Image (tube, grey):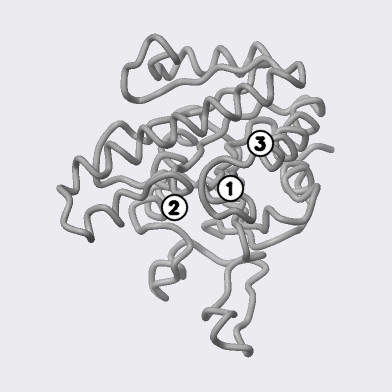
Amino acid sequence: MRKYQRVVLKLSGESLAGDQNFGINPFVVEDISKEVKRVHDEGLEVAIVVGGGNIWRGLAGSAQGMDRASADYMGMLATVMNALALQDSLEKLGVATRVQTAIEMRQVAELYIRRKAIRHLEKNRIVIFGAGTGNPYFSTDTTAALRAAEIEADVILMAKKGTDGIYDADPNRNPRARKFARIQYIDILNRGLQVMDSTATSLCMDNKIPLVVFNIDPYENIYRAALGEDIGTTVSNE
């Protein structure tokens, strides 16, 4: 029996860059799109939230003296570029998609409207959310939590690059770091674990949205996570 019906897939911008670490690698985007198509073909309703760190990071710009709000708006535009790249790749595979953005840009995408997004999902279209929440000072992790709550998703699938779950310490620095198979949101907050920012964590906790954190690199991991296989780390209130 299928575990989920409606999922939000959170992709980092870095995951679209592949080994080149910057920009959009079309071969990587194609591989991700093929996995997403497999999930879609299983009958799941799929929404995607994509970051923009492969092109621009608002926090990095702010750290270099740039106005934080301006830097964050630039990051939102970067996420739209990534969303359009994913849309193009998915549609070449024959999957109907819609890009919805939190900032109005009618020439390239729809403005985000909750009821319209849900209707697209019900009509078997993949919805890609761009431009974050439309507000500076909020991460795309928070966007994923917010959109998941709004569309009543069953789970957030957080595909990470270079890590296969949540650890009690940085495994790159501490060889004794222990990976959690399951952990509660309150423990993430209390331990200060850097899974996603505290706003996103609290939003998921308050709305009882489970989260699965896994490594995007092994092929089929997106498909396995969407079908409810026990991979990575599962975060919930239980």
List the residue tagged with mark 1.
17
- Answer left or right for 157 relative to 40: left
Identify which residue, 116 or 154, lies in the foreground.
116
Which of disc 1 and disc 2 is earlier in sequence?
1
Q: Amino acid at mark 2?
A: Met
Horizontal side, residue 102 vs residue 38: left or right: left
Nearest to the eye among marks 2 and 1: give it: 1
Give the quarter of the image for residue 166. Answer: bottom right
Q: Secondary structure at mark 2?
A: helix
Residue depicted at 55% across the width and 43% down the height: 10
Q: Is residue 20 above or below residue 186?
A: above
The amino acid on which the numbered mark 3 sits, given as a three-letter code, is Pro
The residue under label 3 is: 26
Disc 1 from disc 3: Cα separation? 8 Å
Name the spot of residue 54 as percent of width and height, x first: 48, 48
Q: Residue 179, image x and y in percent?
A: 64, 75
Crowding around mark 3 (Cα neighbors within 10 Å: few <14, some 14 to 19, many 20+) is some
Is the Cβ of the residue at disc 1 closer than 8 Å to that at disc 3?
no
Quote the CA–CA distance across marks 3 and 2. Answer: 35 Å
Looking at the rendered image, the quarter that the N terminus falls into is: top right
- Residue matched to label 2: 205
Residue 100: x and y in percent read 45, 20
